[in-house]
Amino acid sequence: MLSLLFVYIGFLVLYAIYSAMAIYHLRRFGYVGDLTKSVSVVYILLSVMVIVFSIILITTRNWPASFSV
Amino acid sequence: MKEKEEKKLFPAQEKSELVLDIIRKHWFNYVVFWFLAVLMSVPIFVGIALWSNGTITISPLWENILILLIPAYLLFILGLLIYGFVDFYLDVYIVTDRRIVDIAQNGLFKRTISELNLRQIQDVKATVTGIASTLLHFGDVNIQTAGDKPNFVFQAIPHPYEISKKILDLHEAYLQELEKKAKKGTYRNFEEPDELDRNKSIELTENTEKEDSKSESLNKTLTEKWFDGESETCYSDESCRQKLLDGVNKHLAEERSKLKTESKEKEGELKEGKEVDL
């Protein structure tokens, strides 16, 4: 069961790298006064909300070392 | 306080270049991503609603798995939306008073910038196909270029007919301006070079600048020669050009009179019976 948690953490790391690249593109190639800034802020807020909510749920659960489906 | 330097819209943009229009694809192109995102997230929200009502029961083991899977799935959908936005919003067509620029953003890692000089335009065609395009007024604008160069296509842009007309008008105005300059003699590079490629317009700009500076320095040299070292350039100043022309005519007249006197002297020597080197 713990291995699934590690997979999830790995996914979060990849997601963070991907998001950083997307936001870099929007900042670097977007134009002054356009939508890119507000979209970046909304994207970051939503992502943080989902991640924080999942961490809260994860910490409240019991995670046995092994499991069988 | 130092003023902030204005951000260039594309790398080859010149200081005096006037940006007339920035065109993006119609918003309908991004709606496709939203539709996909909503379609993908519906099962999640339906499942959560059914589980909270008690309609479906999940074992604690599956609850643990879903606690990891659902946020990952939601983050994946968010990632898809931002990918679509980058692809849609950073795809831009720019129309300036000198050229047309196509900035194509394909995903996160491919960005292509192509340019087309207004004088290279041969024909502009607008096409609207399909129900959505007709109802929402968007379509393609195909700009045909001279020779073997690939055509420029503005894909799914709003109001294609108006934009195609604008581009044609700009092309006409640009050609008229070039003709005027050619008549004045201030524009030397009127003929389009064969090797001109729309993707090499940055090089072209550099070359044109070089040509301009070359002719400017030539004018300067000429002026200095004819006006006793007066540092004056005759690149676009009409009165200066006239002055230069007068100077050249004066010099030619002097040369002619010199030649005349020399030939008279030689004639006289011949009459006297002396040997003369002709």
Image (spheres, rainbow, N blue to C red):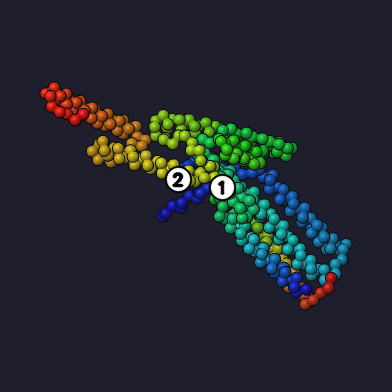
At horizontal 84% and vertical 70% (from top left) the residue drawn is A69
Residue B253: quadrant of the picture: top left
Circle 1 crowding by C-alpha within 10 Å: few under 14, some 14–19, many from 20: some
Q: Are marks 1 and 2 in contact (CB under 8 Å)?
A: no
**Measured from the top left, where is residue B273 in percent x and y?**
12, 24
At horizontal 64% and vertical 61% (from top left) the residue drawn is A18
Q: Name the chain letter of the residue that bears numbered label 1.
A: B
Looking at this view, is B141 or B60 the one in front? Answer: B141
Q: Residue furthest bottom?
A: A65
Q: Residue furthest right?
A: B55
State left or right for residue A63 relative to residue B83: right
Asked if residue B59 can be seen in this view, the reply is: yes
Label 1 vs 2, first from the N-terminus:
1
Q: Quadrant of the C terminus of chain B?
A: top left
Residue at mark 1 to residue at mark 2: CA–CA distance = 17 Å
Residue B241: quadrant of the picture: top left
Looking at this view, is B216 or B266 the one in front? Answer: B266
At horizontal 50% and vertical 38% (from top left) the residue drawn is B194
Circle 2 crowding by C-alpha within 10 Å: few under 14, some 14–19, many from 20: few
Do badges 1 and 2 share one subunit? yes
Against B26, residue B248 (above or below) is above
At horizontal 76% and vertical 63% (from top left) the residue drawn is B70
Numbered disc 1: secondary structure: strand
Residue bearing the label numbered 2: B206
Q: Name the chain letter of the residue that bears numbered label 2.
A: B
Numbered disc 2: secondary structure: helix
Looking at this view, is B186 or A53 the one in front? Answer: B186
Residue bearing the label numbered 1: B113
Q: Amino acid at mark 1?
A: Ile
Q: Amino acid at mark 2?
A: Glu
Q: Residue furthest top?
A: B271
Residue A4: quadrant of the picture: bottom right
